Amino acid sequence: MLGRRELLMGLGAGTVLGHAATATGAPDRRAQLGAQLDGLEVRELREGGRLFLLVVRRGLRPPARVPLLVLLHGLGETGDEQMGAWAWLERYGLASAWQRLERPPIVRTSKRGEWSDARLAEVNAELAARPFRGLAMVCPFMPKLAPHEMPAYAAWLERVVARARAEVPIISPEVDSTYLCGCSLGAYVSLEVMARTPHVFGAWGGVQTAIGAWAAPGYAKRLSTAFGGKARPLFVETSSLDHYRKSSEALHAAFEREGMPATKRVSTGPHDQPWLREVGTLEALLWFDRLSYARAARAADAGAPTPPG
């Protein structure tokens, strides 16, 4: 296993990875990610003919239970199945975020100032107190969907979740340990999916959510109805120059008005992939990782056994 210094030197957070070609001419994505996949297994799978990736930590065995996080990509990758399925790992910094969280302290890898000193100190204190546990992750291809196609895509994701559990039995079967997150257009689609599948996903996150501010109250009400009026973990992340910042702030406020407290994170930077690679994806992954700690704390307070996942 590479040391932390070697790994960080190889992450190269400021550029999109190039693609070395295999003998068939297809990009060798695992080779290009290299050390960023250290300790991770990536499986390319199909459900109903559509591609998704299943990413799990190597070496986990029963009775271990891990939560499952489904991650939807943005508009730029909707036209290419491989590009879409690999977007979070290759373009959005999911693999490098995992390695950085595994090897704290978190340090800046960009000179653009995405991290404030205060937030960096908070994150590192949090990781010192409660180390990163990790999750199983599904990265599905998401085509550009018309509104009438949302129900079918939501149903497909439900089948993907079931398939992931069948492939990796240590994935928790609990709704409370099954999470949905999207970036930009994927965050919009994830709201549509969440409203239709509260029996599948127990927590939601949106990174630079691509909706109009006018739509925020409607989505908050739909989720509140889907949740039966009970709060679930919600995460809203945006940035100072995100052109959807007002939409994210409106969504956060709408959640609060519906009695659904939500975590909001705002860091410095625009709506772009370098921001995701430096801070956006790491913050989202950290937030979802903390949910298992929160569940364990609630179980301890209630005098119950720690729930799986």
Image: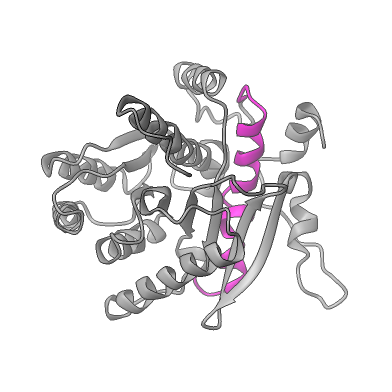
Relative side of 145 to 192, left or right:
right
On screen, residue 37 above or below 27: above
On screen, residue 100 above or below 82: above
Image-quadrant location for residue 138: bottom right
Q: Position of residue 76 (x, y in %)?
A: 50, 64
Instruction: Tell me where the magenta segment starts and ends, as one range.
Output: 78-107
Q: Position of residue 107 (x, y in %)?
A: 62, 24
Identify the residue at horizontal 52%, vertical 44% (top origin).
276
Identify the residue at horizontal 21%, vertical 43% (top origin).
231
Q: Position of residue 132 (x, y in %)?
A: 57, 32
Identify the residue at horizontal 37%, vertical 56% (top origin).
187
Relative side of 295 to 39, left or right:
left
On screen, residue 146 above or below 106: below
Q: Position of residue 209 (x, y in %)?
A: 34, 52
Q: Nearer the viewer, residue 206 or 127?
A: 127
Q: Nearer the viewer, residue 173 or 40?
A: 173
Q: Nearer the viewer, residue 252 or 130?
A: 130
Answer whether residue 105 is magenta in the image.
yes
Coloring applied to the structure? one colour
Answer whether residue 258 is magenta in the image.
no
Location of the N terminus by quadrant is top right
